[in-house]
Image: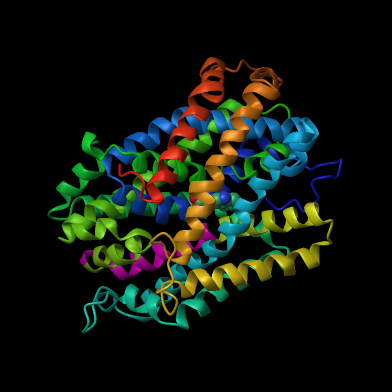
């Protein structure tokens, strides 16, 4: 979305056409969250059980929260900070907390974007086998890259530079237009890689691990990680969907739009998991299931070396991932700019520069945290994991909790239901929506948050 108006302006442009809204929201939703984060979380937190919980949460919790956020945006025609303020001034703070999330995510998103660019570049300039090799100390190409002090920084700055360049010269619209072709191409290509991975010898154990929930994998960590991944992937609990809603026309059906976004987003995440997790087993390295953020970069090179035309597929694949990351990063960066513009009443250029400063500081730490600063950890986490933890496991659940309380008890579900039905259609799942927003979601979040805080400080083990 590239509307550059401040959220306080009275005339807001709308998304054109019925599909316009869904495409723009899906463009923000589909990104590294689906391709990079979902597979490593699923691998790390119990495979089938994670997938199962994710889908259940998406159908209930994700659905209700997204409907609520879009409806709040469309009703108030404001972005997060202004929207809560307008509906009930005391709840202004929810908007402020929500706005912190993109400010933390944007910088480390560019770090990962840089890793993707590095891989794209390596596949362009090197034969596939070389990228799948390990060095004398047994380090993979990725591990060697990430632990070097300067190179990841350069790629990070390059990715950030491209994002800002596109924003500064104002060609986001063109980028968005090409995403209409490149996004479907991405889905197709992820499906091709997924099919290939699943047919590798030994992949069957991985398919079982990924698709069959095992009750022993049910833990607080699994529920928390499925929930936070859901927020991250659908861009929820950070004010984004409120902003998108504020640009949505009155005659568009919110409920159907939300289903379309959710289904599209979940299919891509599911396929990305299928492309990566079975291959972990096929490569005979189940210890990699715990690899975390590096998983995709360690496993995919193994898959591409085994594939016919692997180099060509790899170049195409990393190009499309780069593109998906870039569109999300532009939209994240735009969000930060508009938050700073609205909150501090700044002009656009100083806001761009200020966002850039924050991005460079947090991004540098995230990038160096895997290399020269790797001895610095907090609660056992390196910088990038720490920022991810603060935004996703702490701030987003808190924002989601207060949003539920706000909708459930302050403005009441009927306000949202009324907004959804104002386009002339019935809100079919309004009972589910009401129960989830008033009871299920807030109770679940409180339990999960308390348990995970206790766990982080080693008070309980689950
Ligand atoms: N949902 C995006 C993804 O899956 C990441 C993201 C989170 C995002 N918040 C956002 C993208 C805000 C654009 C705007 O990668």
The residue nearer to you, when weighing 21 against 164, is 164
Picture quadrant where residue 451 is located: top left
The residue nearer to you, when weighing 159 against 462, is 462
Total labels drawn: 0
Q: Residue at x 41, y 62 (%)?
A: 381
Q: Residue at x 44, y 33 (%)?
A: 447
Residue 310 belongs to the span the image colors magenta: yes
Residue 388, percent from left and from top: 49, 56
Q: Is residue 314 left or right of residue 421?
A: left
The residue nearer to you, when weighing 97 against 321, is 97
Give the quarter of the figure containing the C terminus: top left
Residue 28, percent from left and from top: 57, 49
Q: Residue furthest right?
A: 10
Q: Residue at x 26, y 50 (%)?
A: 195
Q: Is residue 281 left or right of residue 15?
A: left
Q: Residue furthest front?
A: 459
Residue 236, percent from left and from top: 56, 41
Q: Is 237 above or below relative to 145?
A: above
Q: Residue at x 60, y 71 (%)?
A: 361
Q: Is residue 30 visible?
A: no
Picture quadrant where residue 87 is located: top right
Q: Is residue 174 left or right of residue 297?
A: right
Residue 304 belongs to the span the image colors magenta: no
Q: Is residue 42 visible?
A: yes
Q: Is 139 above or below relative to 453?
A: below
Residue 420, percent from left and from top: 66, 23
Q: Look at the image and name its color scheme.
A: rainbow
Q: Which residues are magenta?
A: 306-325
The residue nearer to you, when weighing 462 against 430, is 462
Q: Residue furthest left?
A: 201
């Amino acid at each position: 979305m590239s509307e550059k108006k401040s959220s306080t302006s009275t005339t807001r442009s709308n998304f054109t056409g019925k599909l316009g809204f869904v495409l723009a929201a899906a463009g923000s939703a589909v990104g590294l969250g689906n391709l990079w984060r979902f597979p490593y979380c699923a691998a790390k937190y119990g495979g089938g059980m994670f997938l199962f919980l994710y889908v259940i949460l998406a159908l209930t919790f994700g659905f209700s929260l997204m409907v609520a956020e879009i409806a709040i945006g469309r009703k108030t025609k404001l972005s997060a900070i202004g929207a809560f303020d307008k509906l009930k001034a005391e709840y202004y703070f929810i908007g402020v907390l929500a706005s912190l999330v993109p400010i933390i995510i944007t910088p480390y998103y560019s770090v990962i974007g840089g890793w993707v660019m590095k891989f794209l570049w390596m596949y362009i300039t090197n034969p596939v086998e070389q990228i799948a090799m390990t060095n004398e100390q047994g380090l993979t190409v990725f591990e060697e890259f990430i632990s070097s002090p300067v190179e990841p920084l350069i790629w990070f700055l390059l990715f950030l530079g491209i994002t800002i360049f596109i924003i500064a010269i104002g060609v986001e619209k063109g980028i968005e237009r090409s995403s209409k072709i490149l996004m479907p191409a991405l889905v197709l290509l992820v499906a091709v890689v997924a099919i290939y991975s699943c047919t590798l010898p030994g992949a069957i154990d991985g398919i079982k691990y990924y698709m069959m929930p095992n009750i022993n994998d049910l833990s607080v960590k699994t529920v928390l990680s499925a929930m936070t991944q859901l927020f991250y992937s659908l861009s929820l609990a950070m004010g984004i969907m409120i902003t998108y809603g504020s640009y949505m026309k009155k005659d568009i059906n919110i409920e159907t739009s939300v289903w379309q976004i959710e289904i599209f987003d979940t299919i891509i995440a599911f396929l990305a998991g299928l492309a990566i997790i079975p291959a972990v087993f096929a490569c005979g390295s189940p210890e990699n299931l715990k690899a975390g953020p590096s998983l995709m970069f360690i496993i995919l090179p193994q898959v591409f070396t085994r594939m016919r035309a692997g180099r060509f597929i790899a170049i195409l694949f990393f190009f499309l991932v780069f593109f998906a990351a870039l569109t999300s990063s532009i939209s994240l960066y735009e969000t930060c700019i508009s938050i700073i513009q609205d909150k501090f009443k700044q002009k656009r250029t100083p806001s761009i520069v200020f966002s850039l400063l924050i991005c460079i500081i947090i991004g540098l730490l995230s990038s160096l945290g895997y290399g020269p600063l790797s001895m610095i950890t907090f609660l056992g986490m390196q910088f990038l994991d720490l920022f991810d933890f603060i935004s996703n496991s702490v701030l987003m659940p808190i924002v989601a909790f207060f949003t539920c309380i706000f909708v459930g008890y302050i403005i009441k579900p009927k306000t949202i239901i009324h907004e959804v039905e104002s386009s002339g259609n019935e809100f079919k799942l309004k009972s589910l929506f009401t129960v989830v927003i008033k009871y299920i979601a807030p109770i679940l979040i409180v339990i999960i948050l308390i348990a995970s805080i206790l766990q982080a400080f080693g008070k309980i083990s689950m």
